Image (cartoon, rainbow, N blue to C red):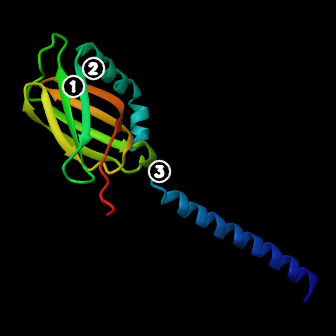
Amino acid sequence: MKPHIVWISIIVGLLALSVVVHGILLVAALSDPSFAVEPDYEAKAANFDAIQRQRWASQRLGWTTELRTRPAVDPGEVEISLEAFDRDGEPIRDAAVELETFHNARAAEVINGRLTHIREGRYRGVLPMTRSGVWEIRLTITSEDDVYVRTLRKNVLSTPRFHLAR
């Protein structure tokens, strides 16, 4: 075989190997559930001032919230209860309570849910939070013209979906 054909074959082979390796790495990165990009991050960056004003407005409302979690009856689900009070300690009634939540180790798997009003200032719901550990919970409470937003991290205990027989 001629020397120039060998060198061309080596160069083409190395380029082909590089393309294959990069393709494998790209597939691995895109299929990893622990890797996530904030949805609509461009819009959030462009509206950063409005988002900050919303957070400050929430603080000025003076509302207090207490969120609790516990394993639900069905395996793989978590019961979430919320108590919400205004600055005077009066319960916030008939509000729309929405949650956006994800486990820190699986940020690409976002769970959205709503809590149901059960009595004065108390709301409850069940979400399929199958992993125990630290979850980020983005809370939005809308009551009449007031909108309260809060982001918190909560250590959640979930029952596993499957139980091993002993």
- At label 2, counting other C-alpha atoms closer than 10 Å, the crowd grade (few under 14, some 14-19, many 20 or more) is some
Q: Which residue is mark 2?
A: 58
| Image coords of residue 58 (percent x, y) | 27, 20
**Residue farthest to the top, as pictured:** 88
Q: Cα distance, mark 1 to mark 2?
A: 7 Å
Tell me the mark number nearer the camera, choosing from 3 and 1: 3
| Left or right of residue 135, residue 94 in this image | left
For badge 2, the amino acid type reads Ser
Which is nearer the eye, 38 or 1? Answer: 38
**Residue farthest to the right, as pictured:** 3
Q: Cα distance, mark 2 to mark 3?
A: 30 Å
Circle 1: element type: strand
- At label 1, counting other C-alpha atoms closer than 10 Å, the crowd grade (few under 14, some 14-19, many 20 or more) is some
| Image coords of residue 46 (percent x, y) | 42, 33
Vertical order, 112 against 166 (above or below): above
Q: Are marks 2 and 3 in contact (CB under 8 Å)?
A: no
Q: Which residue is mark 3?
A: 34
Circle 3: element type: loop
For badge 1, the amino acid type reads Val
Q: Residue at 25% of width from left, 49% of height from top? A: 77
Q: Are marks 1 and 2 in contact (CB under 8 Å)?
A: yes
Q: Which residue is mark 1?
A: 147
| Left or right of residue 115, residue 129 in this image | right
